[in-house]
Image (cartoon, helix red, strand yellow):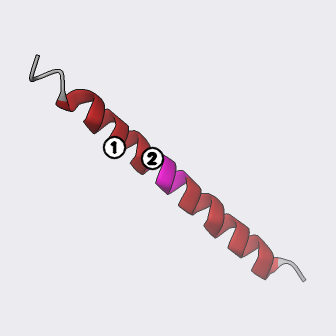
Amino acid sequence: MPVLDPNPQNGQKKLLLVFGAFLAIFVIIGVIATIASP
């Protein structure tokens, strides 16, 4: 039972990290598009 407890937390943390990276990439693309547009 104690082994099963940290698992969802670690998975949630990894999911949050992936979501944060995706959001950061999306923002960077938006900034580049804004700069590149005349």
What secondary structure is the stretch in magenta mostly built from? helix
Label 1, label 2: how many angstroms apart (C-alpha)?
Answer: 9 Å
Q: Position of residue 31 (x, y in %)?
A: 70, 74
Q: Amino acid at mark 2?
A: Val
Assess whether residue 20 is covered by the magenta stretch.
Answer: yes
Please give the name of the residue rendered at 32% of the width and 34% of the height, measured from the top-left corner: 11
- 10 Å crowding of disc 1: few (<14), some (14-19), many (20+): few
Q: Position of residue 22 (x, y in %)?
A: 55, 52
- Tell me which residue sits at (64%, 65%) in the image: 27
**Is the residue 13 above or below the residue 33 in the image?**
above
Q: Nearer the viewer, residue 3 or 23?
A: 3
Check the picture and name the quadrant holding the C terminus.
Answer: bottom right
Which of 2/10 is in front?
A: 2
Residue 21 in the image: state x and y as whole percent: 48, 55
Q: Nearer the viewer, residue 32 or 10?
A: 10
Residue that numbered label 2 is attached to: 18
Q: What residue type is disc 1 on? A: Lys
Q: Quadrant of residue 12?
A: top left
Q: Which residue is mark 1?
A: 13
Label 2: how many Cα within 10 Å (few below 14, some 14–19, many 20+): few
Left or right of 36? Residue 12 is left
Along the line of sight, the residue nearer the viewer: 33 or 12: 12
Q: Residue at x 29, y 29 (%)?
A: 8
Residue at left offset 40%, top offset 50%: 17
Magenta span? 18-22
Residue 36 position (above or below residue 21): below
Direction from residue 33 to residue 28 in the image, left or right: left
Q: Quadrant of the N terminus?
A: top left
**Residue 5, above or below 34:** above
